[in-house]
Image (cartoon, grey):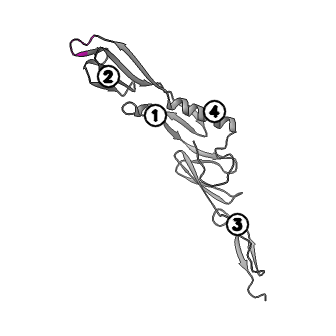
């Protein structure tokens, strides 16, 4: 999910509200995709015989990185803990891929993003920065989020000889500044 660290911005993900709800539901479902299967097994000889894994002593567990599975040999039955995940596209150049490692780490997908995208600044590849000159902001695109830096608010000066002047160019040169004509009394 692309997060915008600037306060007060609406529609920070650059997608309709219904799409955001769908994304959250998808993330929730993905995070709870664990599966437990158990079946009875004769362990009178002190082990479980599991196809593809061989003999597992009672009380021991083994892991399969390929299947993202943990198998436990219990007294009289076998437990298989696993998860079902598939890579899918999240839009905005991001997608989930299954993670490597032992169960349950392999069940938590990794979010990969190729770029950050916005209507006012287009696409910025991950690891690069871009500019939104319409808002006088610099956008730094990182893996999974964007960091937006802007000018902040410039208050009207109290001194009548001073005024706010718009800047020009990319951030920070486009930030408004205060100019004072100190020759006027």
Using the image as rendered, state which of residue 108 and residue 110 is in the foreground.
Answer: 108
Residue at image position (55%, 32%) is 28
Q: Which residue is mark 1?
A: 108
Disc ID at residue 72: 2
**Which label sits in the foreground, 2 or 3?**
2
Residue at image position (67%, 44%) is 14
Mark 3: few, some, or many residues within 10 Å (few <14, many ≥20)?
few
Q: Which residue is mark 3?
A: 168
| Residue 52 higher or lower than 144, as above or below | above
Which numbered disc flags the more N-terminal residue, 4 or 3? 4
Would residue 46 be counted in the magenta stretch? yes
Which numbered disc flags the more N-terminal residue, 3 or 1? 1
**Which label sits in the foreground, 2 or 1?**
2
| Residue 92 higher or lower than 128, as above or below | above
Secondary element under disc 4, as helix, strand or loop, is: helix
Residue at image position (52%, 30%) is 30
Using the image as rendered, state which of residue 38 and residue 150 is in the foreground.
Answer: 38
């Amino acid at each position: 999910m692309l997060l915008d660290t600037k306060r007060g911005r609406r529609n920070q993900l650059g997608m309709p509200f219904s799409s955001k709800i769908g994304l959250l539901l998808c993330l929730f479902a993905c995070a709870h995709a664990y599966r437990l299967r158990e079946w009875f097994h004769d362990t009178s000889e002190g082990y479980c015989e599991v196809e593809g894994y061989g003999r597992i002593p009672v009380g021991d567990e083994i892991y399969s990185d390929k299947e993202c599975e943990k198998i436990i040999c219990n007294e009289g039955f076998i437990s298989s803990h696993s998860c079902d995940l598939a890579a899918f596209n999240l839009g905005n150049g991001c997608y989930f891929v299954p993670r490597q490692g032992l169960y349950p780490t392999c069940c938590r997908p990794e979010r990969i993003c190729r770029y950050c995208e916005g209507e006012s600044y287009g696409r910025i590849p991950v690891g690069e920065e871009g500019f939104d000159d319409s808002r006088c902001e610099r956008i730094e695109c990182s893996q999974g989020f964007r960091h937006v830096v802007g000018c902040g608010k410039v208050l009207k000066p109290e001194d009548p000889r001073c005024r706010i002047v718009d800047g020009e160019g990319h951030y920070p040169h486009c930030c408004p500044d205060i100019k004072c004509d100190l020759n006027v009394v």
